[in-house]
Image (cartoon, rainbow, N blue to C red):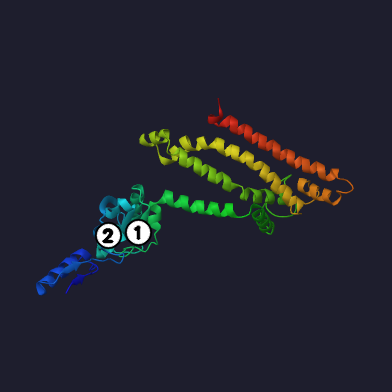
Amino acid sequence: MKVVVAPNAFKGSLTAREAASAMAAGVRRALPDAPVVEVPVADGGDGLVDVALKALNGETRSLAVTGPHDRPITASFCHVPSERLAVIEMALASGLVLVAESERDLLTATSRGVGELIRAAVALGCARIIVGIGGSATNDGGIGMAAALAGRFSDTVLMWITDLAYAFPDLLAIILLRQVLLGRNWPIIGEGNPQIPGFNGVLLVTVIAISFVSWTTVARLVRGQMLSIKEQDYVTAARAMGASPWRVVRVHMLPNTLSAVIVSATFGIPLAIFAEATLGFIGLGVPPPNASLGSLIGAGLDSIQVHPVQLIWPTLMVATLMLCFTFLGDGLRDALDPRTRR
């Protein structure tokens, strides 16, 4: 008869491995001739890392992290370099066993230490991370982990928002936003007499709507520039000399993205001109007596058989304006990009 011993951890007393050893010893005393196999298991709570180390032939990685009540502790996780895998046990960084009974308070405890373990695993090049969330001393919903992963977490969320806005059709978004804003009786924004001298409220709403769909390209460009610049030697040197993150961004990184932003904004002007002309053409531009190239094109279309010039001239003007700003963007790119200089 072969005996397989596969216990889970006994919370607060024995780990799964210790329980398996104790049970195996008892079986061997009762059945000296029976082969005994120890298979400690874990359900994601206490003992997960201990079991993973044996089952996956992993390595222990220990580091100082923030404990459940913001006190420094030492926690570890299982690292399997060949699989680029990390197994993290929440109980080792934010677990009940780390907190005295008199200090157990779900509302004040934090999971920040778990985020610090995840950050360490990512720094080791782990592509897969398994987190067991059993045995926790907090119910902060992972806010502490998000705080520890602030840069990576916020970057991911913001890029999700940017990609969502980028995927939405520009013209449809402009029309929807324009109609929503025009239906509000807010200061400055809305229909009626101009609330800014010389600037009609409908025109302001149109400008806001077009600007709202134009930021995604610049945001993606600035993110790419920042990710590239932060790896440069002069940024590393500034950090080594003790410069604060805000100073590094303000003095060393942000100025080096301005040229790309200026060029991108210049290339965006033709798209804004075309969007406004489209709104005017379909009757959603600024109302008469204000002039709009799009509305002029729409009016000229009605008399194209009799007076084609009324259609040709505003169409040529739109094309000329777009072409001029495109040439301006090309010129600024050549002037501001050092790589194009000879």
In x, y percent, where is residue 236? 39, 36
Q: Tell me what residue is drawn at x 70 percent, y 54 percent.
A: 190
In front of the other: 231 or 75: 231
Q: Is residue 95 left or right of residue 162?
A: left
Task: Look at the image and tell me whether residue 25 can be seen.
Answer: yes
At x 74% / y 42%, what residue is drawn? 318
Q: Which residue is mark 1?
A: 130
**Residue 112 image point, x, y percent:** 35, 55
| Residue at which label 2 appears | 52
Q: Quadrant of residue 284?
A: bottom right
Q: Earlier in the sequence, mark 2 or mark 1?
A: 2
Q: Secondary structure at mark 2?
A: helix
Q: Is the C-beta separation of discs 2 and 1 under 8 Å? A: yes
The amino acid beneath tag 1 is Ile
Please give the name of the residue rendered at 73% of the width and 55% of the height, measured from the top-left corner.
191
316 is higher (above) or lower (below) than 67: above
Q: How many labels sit on residues?
A: 2
Q: Height in image: 248 above or below 184? A: above
- Disc 2 marks a residue whose amino acid type is Ala
Q: Residues within 10 Å of mark 1 (few under 14, many from 20)?
A: few
Depth order, front residue of 202/116: 116
Quarter in which the C terminus is drawn: top right
Q: Which mark is residue 59?
A: none
- Quarter of the picture holding the N terminus: bottom left
